[in-house]
Image (tube, rainbow, N blue to C red):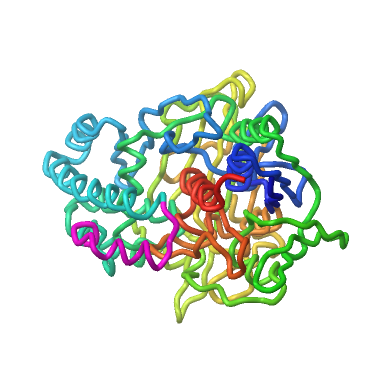
Amino acid sequence: MSSIIVIGAGVGGLTAAARLAGAGHSVTVFERSGELGGKLAVHERDGFRFDTGPSLLTLPQVFTEAQPDLVPLDPVVRHVFADGTVLDSSAVHAEFLDRIAVALGPEAAHDWDRFWTRARRIWDASWRSVLRNPVTPASLAGLTWRVGDLAAIAPGRSLRALGRQYLRDPRLRTMLDRYATYTGADPRRAPAALAAVPYAELAFGGFYVPGGLGTIATTLEERCSAAGVRIVRNTEVQRITAEGGKVTGVRLAGGEFVPAAAVVSNVDALTVYRDLLPAPRRLSGLTDRSLGGFVLLLGVRGETPELAHHTVFFPSYYDAEFDDIFGSASRRARPAGDPTVFVTRAVDPAVHPAGCEAWFVLINAPRHGSGWRAVDWRRPGLADAYADRVLAVLAERGLDVRHRLLFRETRTPADLAEATAAPGGAIYGTAGGLMRPVNHGPVEGLHLVGGSVHPGGGLPMVTLSAQIVADRIGPA
């Protein structure tokens, strides 16, 4: 039996721990906070329960360790465009085409059907060659022999360009652009391969977990406990130790050394390379950092029938939002003046008192920091002022909830950075791209899981990263 240490009890860390313990290893998880789940966090107040991280579960087939109860969503997402058009997505392709035809016209439905054929090819290539396998020189060399896969993925082309090739209606293009933000990226620079994201969401369905997605962390904790994993809360790992190019263990913040044959880190890859290794390393494969998120947690009186479980309200000019969030060589990043507003409202009595609703409102936002492409979210008054602006934007788009509020709370990228050690509060660590930091570290026996490394951010990808690492380590 070999001893393995897992740093961080996020979904990736807990999934890897359960899988490795099931393979016969002795596994200890060190978590710096008192809560498990990482970004899959929960906040409770006055009978309201909020998921403050992921709010949509896709690709249910990958959650072999968590095995959550699932409620299929229809629509998966309700899209409200600037001109007032409403389009409900569906996991049934023929039904979605009918809805597009009614809302946007038969030509738009025809265009989406053509795009869907291409998206399926991209998904098939990604699933077969990339998402479930470690990135190594050998695997990349193997991919180059699949000419059809490369043609489908279209390296060098952006998601925006792919949308313009297939979709004539600007509202469909806007809807497609939004999927780049699922990986923290700007659609104008994100790879066309991200067309796999809407395919995964709509081909396999979107789901809610009764009680909220935060219950997945509880399920994973139970699986870890049943497998014999030792979980140590409120204990920070200060350093990963190594000798002769091989991991020897970790040193805790209090100075204690804990030996291990291997270390699995569920910490952001940038933090691992910069802060946890014996000597700082340059992180290869690191592209742009992900955007952050500004969140409102709203306790709302009454019911809102115009909302689906997930409803997104688009601005009239989407590019202005990306210019604000990511900045440019001549313009500092700033909170978007006319942002896209994403509202999650679960019809689930377990998450709100009777006669009320719990709203999770997410706005894409610049990362926290002092640089040209970041915003100091600790600046006094900024969070409250921006919360006022977001509620005003909702009112301008036909949903004024200000007079129905029981309370509101804010969460900024600075709060996420503090709570989860995500540099700058970047939601997905590394923004969406074909090349992310790999799952093995620069010293033997060090492995990385989570949204900042291959294959990417979001619950399914994080879970796949844990499975890749556990399979790479193998049985005891």
On the image, the x and y values in percent for residue 114 come to 15, 47
When asked about the image quadrant of residue 247, the answer is bottom right
- Magenta residues, dominant SS class: helix
Q: Quadrant of the C terminus?
A: top right
Is 350 on the left-hand or right-hand side of 119?
right
Give left or right: position of 247 versus 194. Answer: right
Residue 392 visible in the displayed image:
no
The total number of labels drawn is 0
Name the residue at 57% across, 69% down.
374
Which residue is painted at 77% across and 57% down in the image? 259
Q: Residue at x 28, y 61 (%)?
A: 160
Position of the N terminus, as image quadrant, is: top right
Q: Is residue 117 visible?
A: yes
Residue 292 part of the magenta-drawn span: no
Q: Position of residue 98 (x, y in %)?
A: 19, 31
In reply to whether residue 147 is colored magenta, the answer given is: yes
* Above or below for 12 versus 22: below
In-front residue for pair 466/9: 466
Residue 163 in picture, x, y percent from top left = 24, 56
Frontmost residue, 374 versus 397 = 374
Q: Nearer the viewer, residue 5 or 149?
A: 5
Q: Which residues are magenta?
A: 133-150
Can you give x and y, in whole percent of width and height, for residue 135 in the image? Answer: 43, 61
Give the left or right position of residue 57, taking residue 419 as reference. left
Q: Could you tell me which residue is drawn at 58 percent across and 65 percent down?
A: 441
